[in-house]
Amino acid sequence: MLHSSLAITSPKLICSFQSTSTSDSYRPCRRLRLSAKIDDGSADQFLQNNSIADFMRFKRDNHAQLQTALLTYRKKFPWSLLQPFLRVDLVSTIHIADKEYFTTLQKELEGYDCVLYEMVASRESLENRRSPEPRKKLKSSNSRGFNIIGCIQRQMAKLLKLDFQLDCLDYQADNWYHADLDLETFKLLQLEKGESFFTFARDMTLRSTKAMVQPALPREDLGPWRSKLLWAARVVPMPLVGLLIIGGVCSDIGNQAEYPEVEALSRLDFGAAMKVFLAKRLTSEFAQVTADVEETSVIIGERNRAATEALRRAIDGGNKKIAILYGGGHMPDLGRRMREEFELVPSQVQWITAWSIENRNLTSSSLPFLKKLAEIFQWPLNRYQTLALLIFSSLLALDLWFWELFFGTTVNWVSNVASDLIHYVDNNQFM
């Protein structure tokens, strides 16, 4: 019943998926190299069920990069004989990124017959978007849950000096079509299933936590005992000094380039260090396949169903080159639907740089007498590295003090309890 209501709320949208494909409608996008970097890659990893982390990757060249996937699907044989020119691209996005990233996406998507984008917005807002009158900027929903998430994303963008997707992408292009639930249907489905943003986040967190505490398979480059040490560092509370020692024991001493966050912290470039830390977490901590949770949820499953219904209408309308522009969290389930519902298989993947993480150019000029002291004592660090070392040492000392206080309090409490028990037992024996 609710799915049919979605179709009823947007009759104009259904009829608007007319083919815009012509012999010269596709404009080559190699000229976009002047914006964000685009790399080609192999699509073999997308042939089976995937996790969110598969649609993002952390790359380390001259500087660290967080990249998102643009994955191309085509009909598999023998269906490719019937629709040889059909191409569906899953364009994975991250909602806060460099401005060049959104510029590249915007220009890449100009060459598509049809771009199906995500946005939970009210029916009134969607009707205004389709109105022939001068268009107002399409706004996302005013739902409380979406407001909280949007506020967090905007604050993160400011903190990391990045830009927000809704502020950078132009959703008013003629080949862009809304392919998501409207706000009213979204709320109704959530009410029907007893779901909210917080219950969904709880379920996903429980899944990830269970996966994290399970003993990991030994890494070939570390061996069994160092792999167990790394696992213990993830699940056992310990002082920062312990984590630092384990990290040093298990790290590849000959390849310090694997830890650009340490280099950024040594230069007091906290923004770059935070970006590297988050990029590594995004591409590693979300490696658990959670298809069953995603498929049955409203936030992922029902919205993806709306996207695939819009895709079906776009194909029926004669469009040949179609993009589905959705966040990375939707991509594992969308990829499964491409294979199972549309008989499409991944054929190629491009990686677009969302975060280009470069260290700041810091001048190492200092006061003359400090330079002289450094020369006398042969001090190898510049002033930024020295200050970073002092700050880090202070944090380690403070952390050790808290652990000492914690253990001291715990030992005193256990001693008092044991003393009271012994005293109680002795009194009972005398009685």
Image (cartoon, rainbow, N blue to C red):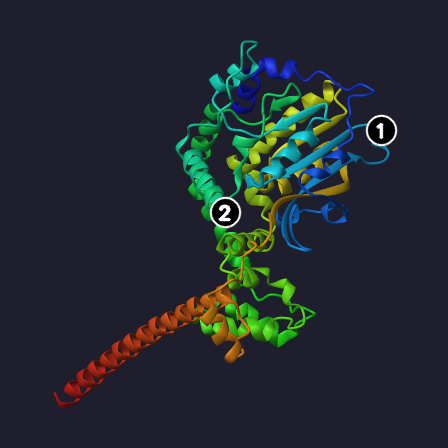
Q: Is residue 412 above or below residue 260?
A: below
Question: Left or right: 399 with respect to 59?
Answer: left
Q: Nearer the viewer, residue 320 or 251?
A: 251
Which mark is nearer the camera, 2 or 1?
2
Q: Residue at x 18, y 82 (%)?
A: 424
Q: Residue at x 18, y 85 (%)?
A: 423
* Res. 18 mark: none
Q: Nearer the viewer, residue 20 or 136?
A: 136
Give the image location of residue 99, x and y in percent: 58, 37
Q: Is residue 97 visible?
A: yes
Q: Amino acid at mark 1?
A: Pro
Q: CA distance from mark 2 to mark 1?
A: 44 Å
Q: Residue furthest left?
A: 431
In primary-sequence order, the first of circles 2 and 1 is 1
* Res. 84 mark: 1
Q: Residues within 10 Å of mark 1 (few under 14, many from 20)?
A: some
Q: Is residue 343 visible?
A: no
Q: Is residue 262 above or below residue 179?
A: below
SS of the residue at dot 2? loop
Q: Residue furthest top?
A: 133
* Picture mark count: 2
Q: Residue furthest front?
A: 368
Q: Residues within 10 Å of mark 2 (few under 14, many from 20)?
A: some
Give the image location of residue 364, x and y in percent: 53, 62
Give the image location of residue 284, x and y in percent: 59, 55
Circle 2 sits on which residue?
160
Quadrant that contains the C terminus: bottom left
Q: Amino acid at mark 2?
A: Leu
